[in-house]
Image (cartoon, rainbow, N blue to C red):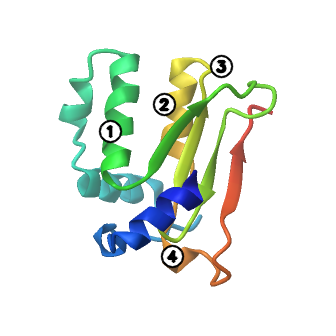
């Protein structure tokens, strides 16, 4: 699906419409990174506190990430296998979350799955996969 969507974007010459993601390392201050990302995404603490419940929070965060051209998928993955995964791509990153998992865990997976830009992916053009597993 990711490769089909990426090819369609290239055919429609829409590849320049994607925002640049900042590279983050383990040496970066997590509070500063969170503040920067909140600012970039336009999600203040006040806005987040208006999410009605955890289901609304998942829906809103999904909309926010999709507005950044991140493809969000939900799949029936057993929690023993993985809570979710992300496919890192130069153009169209993908985050998949397990519908077998609790909604709170899905929100966590959605927000902690790494997605990065072409500047942080090797030039090989290959997609890289990370897995979020409960163990």
Pick out the residue farthest to the bottom: 123
Report which quarter residue 57 is drawn in: top left
Position of residue 46 measured from the top left corner of the image (x, y, whole percent): 18, 33
Whether the residues at callouts 4 and 3 have beta carbons within 8 Å, the answer is no
Q: Is residue 127 above or below residue 64?
A: below
Give the CA separation, mark 2 to mark 3: 13 Å
User: To which residue does mark 2 refer?
Assistant: 107
Q: Secondary structure at mark 3?
A: loop
Q: Secondary structure at mark 4?
A: helix
Q: Which residue is mark 4?
A: 118
Q: Position of residue 41 (x, y in %)?
A: 27, 52
Quarter of the image that includes the C terminus? top right
Badge 2, how many Cα within 10 Å: few under 14, some, many 20+? some
From this view, report whether residue 60 is shown above or below residue 18.
above
Taking the image as drawn, is residue 83 in sight? yes
Mark 3 crowdedness (10 Å alpha carbons): few <14, some 14-19, many ≥20: some
Q: CA distance from mark 4 to mark 3?
A: 31 Å
Residue of label 1: 63
Quarter of image, res 21: bottom left
Residue 56 horizontal/vertical position (percent): 33, 21
Q: Earlier in the sequence, mark 2 or mark 1?
A: 1
What's the residue at 32%, 38% (across, down)? 63
Which of these two is toward me, 120 or 125?
Answer: 125
The residue that appears at 61% across and 50% down in the rendered structure is: 86
Q: Of label 2 and label 3, which has the lower sequence position?
A: 3
Q: Which one is in front, 27 or 9?
A: 9
Compared with 3, 78 (above or below) is above
Mark in the foreground, 2 or 1: 1
Disc marking residue 100: 3
């Amino acid at each position: 699906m990711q490769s089909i969507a990426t090819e369609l974007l290239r055919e429609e010459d829409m590849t320049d419409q994607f925002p640049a993601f900042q590279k983050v390392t383990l040496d970066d201050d997590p509070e500063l990174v969170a503040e920067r990302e909140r600012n970039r995404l336009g999600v203040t603490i006040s806005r987040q506190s208006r999410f009605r419940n955890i289901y609304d929070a998942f829906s809103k965060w999904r909309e926010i990430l999709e507005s950044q051209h991140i493809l969000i998928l939900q799949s029936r993955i057993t929690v023993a296998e993985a809570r979710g995964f992300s496919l890192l791509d130069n153009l169209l990153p993908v985050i998949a979350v397990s519908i077998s998992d609790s909604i709170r865990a899905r929100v966590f997976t959605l927000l902690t799955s790494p997605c990065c830009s072409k500047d942080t992916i090797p030039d090989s053009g290959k997609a890289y996969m990370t897995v979020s597993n409960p163990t």
